[in-house]
Image (cartoon, grey):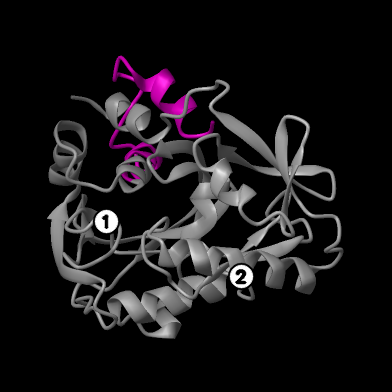
């Protein structure tokens, strides 16, 4: 196993004809698997076939109308078990992060439509002399997605209605009891993009990455029940776990690799270095 293996596990989507373009107002905003498309055909007043794809009915012409129209069939499909647990958290749907969204969609349904999603990942770390130690979270066993996997100290999806730093501060408080004044010192250090395919569909996602250097006497404490425990580990140990196991959630492993590169822990001496750096931005 290697760092490159982790990247390939994360960015694993294969181009092909298994997916149909999902369009809104004539613009592609996602991809729907052919096997899931018949479920949308059950709601012809909302979803229509458009040549080789599936589109939102042109009868819905504004943000509110589209959102309401899509939500009704999603509620039905959720009741039939097509989604991994309703979250009551809306994600924007559009053509780009800084573009005006066309409507919003329940978070858990997003992969079924292959809609780009965004999130924030915060590396909490402390310095001990020349060494770096990372706070690592373990996801609760009752989480609907990736239970028991290792994770960044704080990470969360980017919902409708919040700016990135607002979300960083919110998630830091909820997931690790980090005071707002400390969370606000998190530094934006980049973005990682990938397209991950699973049984739930396609995830063309972007992670906005932040570094948060913490006081040595600070200990994170989970308050929302989503993290079972936190551990402070030497970066060298986190590197070994990341490279040699699949203990980390697939995209969190890739976020780790980005941290290792930026802090000079993973260097060009690694024979896969060029492929690794390319793999962070696909």
Left/right of residue 95 with respect to residue 244 in the rendered view: right
Whether residue 158 is visible to the viewer of this picture, yes or no, is: no
Is 57 a magenta residue?
no
Whether residue 48 is visible to the viewer of this picture, yes or no, is: yes
Q: Quadrant of residue 127?
A: bottom left
Residue nearer the viewer, 228 or 63 = 63
Residue 199 place in picture, x, y as percent: 37, 41
For the residues bearing labels 1 and 2, Cβ distance under 8 angstroms: no
Left/right of residue 137 with respect to residue 266 in the rendered view: left
Q: Quadrant of residue 257?
A: top left
Q: Secondary structure at mark 2?
A: helix
Which residue is label 1 attached to? Answer: 151
Sequence-wise, which precedes: disc 1 or disc 2? 2
Which residue is label 2 attached to? Answer: 72
Query: Residue at left 66%, top 64%?
Result: 70
Query: In this rendering, which labeled residue sits more in front, label 1 or label 2?
Result: 2
Query: Residue at left 24%, top 78%?
Result: 225
Q: Quadrant of residue 122?
A: bottom left
Q: Please give the range of residues in magenta.
A: 256-282
Residue 281 place in picture, x, y as percent: 53, 34
Left/right of residue 183 with respect to residue 257 in the rendered view: right
Q: Residues within 10 Å of mark 1 (few under 14, many from 20)?
A: many
Residue 183 place in picture, x, y as percent: 42, 75
Q: Residues within 10 Å of mark 2 (few under 14, many from 20)?
A: few
């Amino acid at each position: 196993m290697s760092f490159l293996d982790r990247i390939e596990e994360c960015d694993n989507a294969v181009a092909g004809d298994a997916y149909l373009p999902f369009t809104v107002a004539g613009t592609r905003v996602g991809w729907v698997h052919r096997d899931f498309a018949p479920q949308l055909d059950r709601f012809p007043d909302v979803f229509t076939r458009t040549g080789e794809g599936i589109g939102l009915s042109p009868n819905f012409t504004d943000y509110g109308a589209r959102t309401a129209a899509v939500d009704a069939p999603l509620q039905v499909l959720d009741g039939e078990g097509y989604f991994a647990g309703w979250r009551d958290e809306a994600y924007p749907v559009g053509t780009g992060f800084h573009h005006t969204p066309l409507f919003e969609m329940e978070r858990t349904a997003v992969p079924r439509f292959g809609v780009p999603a965004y999130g924030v990942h915060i590396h909490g770390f402390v310095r001990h002399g020349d060494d770096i130690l990372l706070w690592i979270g373990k996801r609760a066993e009752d989480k609907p997605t990736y239970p028991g996997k290792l994770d960044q100290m704080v990470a969360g999806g980017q919902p409708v209605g919040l700016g990135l730093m607002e979300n960083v501060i919110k998630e830091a408080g909820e997931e690790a009891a980090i005071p707002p004044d400390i969370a606000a010192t998190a530094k934006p250090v980049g973005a990682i993009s990938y397209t991950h395919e699973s049984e739930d569909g396609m995830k063309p996602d972007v992670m906005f990455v932040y570094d948060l250097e913490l006081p040595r006497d600070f200990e994170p404490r989970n308050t929302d029940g989503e993290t079972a425990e936190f551990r402070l580990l030497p970066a060298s140990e986190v590197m070994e776990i990341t490279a040699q196991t699949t203990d980390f959630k697939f995209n969190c492993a890739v976020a780790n690799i980005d941290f290792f590169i930026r802090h000079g822990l993973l260097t060009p001496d690694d024979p896969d270095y060029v492929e690794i750096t390319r793999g962070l931005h696909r």
